[in-house]
């Protein structure tokens, strides 16, 4: 395969594997709450943080990280797939309440699109087709007109200033636990990896979340039972979401990173877990909605987001990031791998894990206040707790100092 085509295939694979129910729905909530700047503080660190992984991880670094942090990567994998499947059941085709799929007679079409997404995720080269189909949906919707960012949402809420550092922290660090990212990095040379990650996120993924910006107003109206688009346009948007959700689930389940492709028993377990969470969502009492000002499924969605805003980036920050530059030789470009170079290649010690769990427990109430109660100023001390917790973690050692104590 020509080098340029290989890079394009992996770029599309990366873009589609990262197009989750986060990129296709979180901007909808952020635009509602914070205006257009909500999309900006989501998109900029997301694109830059994901693209940076292709440049930060040098040859063999990814392999060592996967060996050292396999349980954390597997946890990331399970939570991510459960999140996507839960979203299908809670938002795309919910048994109760309004959904994004339009009228009930569209459910069969959505199921077909989900099946297509599953099939496209079987080989990384089919990521190009998955991306093309989604962009075709976007082009069709935009050609029919009627979707734009409303002028009322161009103003920004001051709370976005407290949200921005948390977005930057989460999107900068979460990619290092994503098995599909590691699979792409390990399959490419350093030069091709940099090109694939830059193209995948700087162009292809950015186009996906730009589409989210365009349909945000419609999504909010549809969830409120005020559908303002023709059924065919609504179905095209829902088809894009369904396709990408199932593609993401498939490539995660089939990733060879960590414990390898999931056997049928584990796939069944994950599906049952997602169904249990979806069923539990409808049992959340109405008083929660009354106290937080949001419906139950949005509260659960935001709780899922806590993994990517707090739990996973805190793990990377405390258990993977090296305390100081690598003492060995630089790579071929003369750039020493200053992060993930030393202690990041060893499994975290019991002390480090205790610091991690304690930090998450202490910071969690602050993140609850910021994301569920929507008092965003509480995010500042919550993030500060996580950042300062590094003082209680041993700093990195040189590569010649032997195994960790």
Image: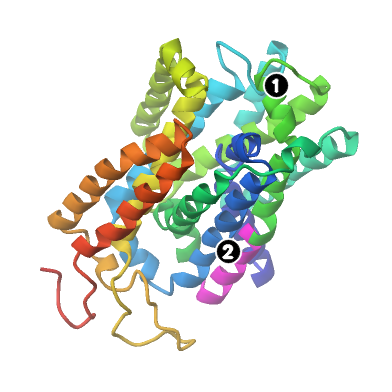
Residue at 63% x, 49% y: name it. 127
- Decide if residue 168 is in sight here: yes
Which percent across, then down, holds residue 33? 61, 35
Quadrant position of the N terminus in the picture: bottom right
Name the residue nearer the viewer: 327 or 323: 323
Residue at 33% x, 79% y: name it. 325
Quadrant position of the C terminus in the picture: bottom left
Residue at 50% x, 33% y: name it. 84
Residue 136 shows which numbered tag?
none
- Decide if residue 260 is in sight here: no
Residue on which the image places disc 2: 197
Kindly indicate the quadrant of the structure image that contains residue 300: top left
Residue 222 shows which numbered tag?
1
Residue at 33% x, 43% y: name it. 75
Q: Which residues are magenta?
A: 187-201
The answer to whether 358 appears left or right of 199 in the picture is left
Which percent across, then down, holds residue 107? 66, 17
* Above-or-below relation of 118 to 3: above
Provide the secondary structure element on which disc 1 rests: helix
Kindly indicate the quadrant of the structure image that contains residue 200: bottom right
Closer to the camera: disc 1 or disc 2?
Answer: 1
Please say if the residues under marks 1 and 2 sit with CB atoms less than 8 Å apart. Answer: no
Is 26 within the magenta? no
């Amino acid at each position: 395969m020509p080098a340029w085509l290989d890079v394009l295939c992996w770029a599309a694979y990366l873009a589609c594997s990262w197009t989750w129910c986060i990129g296709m729905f979180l901007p909808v909530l952020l635009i509602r709450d914070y205006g257009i700047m909500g999309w900006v503080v989501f998109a900029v660190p997301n694109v830059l943080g994901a693209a940076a992984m292709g440049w930060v991880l040098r040859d063999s670094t990814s392999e060592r990280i996967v060996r050292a942090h396999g349980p954390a990567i597997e946890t990331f994998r399970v939570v991510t797939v459960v999140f996507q499947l839960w979203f299908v059941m809670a938002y795309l085709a919910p048994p109760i309440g309004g959904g994004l799929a339009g009228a009930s007679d569209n459910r069969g079409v959505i199921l077909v699109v989900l099946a297509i997404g599953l099939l496209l995720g079987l080989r990384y080269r089919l990521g190009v087709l998955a991306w093309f189909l989604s962009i075709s949906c976007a082009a069709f919707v935009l050609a029919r007109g009627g979707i734009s960012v409303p002028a009322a949402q161009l103003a920004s809420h001051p709370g976005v200033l407290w949200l921005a550092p948390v977005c930057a922290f989460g999107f900068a660090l979460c990619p290092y636990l994503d098995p599909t990212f590691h699979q792409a990095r390990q399959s490419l040379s350093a030069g091709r990896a940099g090109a694939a990650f830059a193209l995948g996120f700087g162009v292809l993924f950015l186009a996906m979340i730009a589409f989210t910006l365009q349909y945000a107003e419609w999504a909010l109206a549809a969830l409120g039972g005020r559908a303002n688009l023709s059924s065919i346009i609504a179905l095209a948007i829902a088809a894009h979401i369904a396709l990408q959700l199932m593609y993401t689930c498939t490539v995660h389940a089939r990733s060879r990173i960590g414990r390898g492709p999931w056997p049928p028993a584990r796939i069944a377990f994950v599906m049952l877990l997602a169904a249990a969470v979806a069923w539990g969502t409808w049992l959340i009492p109405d008083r929660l909605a009354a106290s937080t000002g949001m419906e139950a499924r949005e509260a659960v969605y935001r709780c899922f987001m806590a993994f990517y805003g707090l739990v996973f980036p805190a793990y990377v920050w405390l258990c993977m990031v090296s305390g100081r530059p690598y003492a060995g030789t630089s790579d071929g470009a003369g750039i020493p791998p200053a992060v993930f170079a030393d202690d990041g290649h060893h499994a975290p010690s019991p002390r480090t894990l205790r610091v991690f769990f304690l930090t998450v427990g202490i910071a969690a109430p602050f993140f609850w206040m910021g994301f569920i109660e929507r008092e965003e100023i509480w995010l500042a001390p919550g993030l500060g707790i996580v950042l300062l917790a590094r003082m209680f973690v041993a700093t990195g050692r040189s590569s010649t100092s032997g195994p960790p104590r």
